[in-house]
Structure formats: structure tokens, C-alpha cells
Amino acid sequence: MSTVVTYTEARQNLASLLEKALAEGEVYIKRRDGRVFVLKPAEIKASPLDVEGVDLGVSTEEIIAFIAESRRFGG
């Protein structure tokens, strides 16, 4: 079951509450008037183009030379 805290507890312990939401998936904050709110981590959608680079041991100058050479030969 998720954690339920009061609004006052949430204000006083926000950092630990954020960690708890991360660990448990969500935390409920209950106000004095009975309304309840849910605090949960946002889903971060990564781009499929976010990939690790590969070190090929080729310098910038060499890459530029390869491109220039391929353009000379119509590649």
C-alpha cells in the first residue's frame, strides 16, 4: 500500500517524500478538508535517437577528410 501523509507532513518533509514516491511509485497527500492528491514520479520518455557514442579513434579532421573525399567521387 502506498504511503498517506498529511499536507503539513508533506510540506515539512518534501525531500524524503519525493524519495518515498520514487521507491513506492506514489504517495498520497491528504488535506484537512479531506481532498487527496497523488505525488508520483514523472515518466521520462527517452528519444530512440539517444544512444551511447562509440569511440572509433577517428579525429574530427579525419572525418571531414572522409566526407570531402566521398563528395569528390560522387559518393
Image: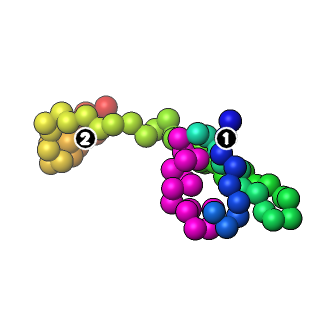
Whether 45 is drawn above or below 56: the answer is below
Q: Magenta span covers which residues?
A: 10-23
Residue positioned 15% across, 48% down in the render: 61
Asked if residue 49 shows in the view, the reply is: yes
Residue wearing tag 1: 2
Asked if residue 44 shows in the view, the reply is: no
Q: For the residue marked with disc 1, what is the amino acid?
A: Ser
- From the viewer's perspective, tell me whether residue 2 is left or right of residue 69: right
Percent position of residue 52, x then y: 33, 37
Query: Looking at the rendering, which quadrant does residue 2 occupy?
Result: top right
Whether 62 is drawn above or below 14: the answer is above
Percent position of residue 13, x then y: 55, 62
| Viewer-nearest of discs 2 and 1 | 1
Q: How many marks?
A: 2
Q: For the residue marked with disc 2, what is the amino acid?
A: Ile
Q: How is the image coloured?
A: rainbow
Residue positioned 56% across, 62% down in the render: 14
Q: Nearer the viewer, residue 11 or 64?
A: 11
Residue 34 disc label:
none
Residue wearing tag 2: 67
Tell me which secondary structure the magenta stretch mostly adopts: helix
Answer few, some or many: residues within 10 Å of disc 1's Cα (few below 14, many 20 plus, some between 14 and 19): few
Residue positioned 58% across, 68% down in the render: 12
Query: Could you tell me which secondary element the residue under label 2 belongs to?
Result: helix
Q: Is residue 16 magenta?
A: yes
- From the viewer's perspective, tell me whether residue 43 is left or right of residue 52: right
Q: Name the image quarter holding the N terminus.
A: top right
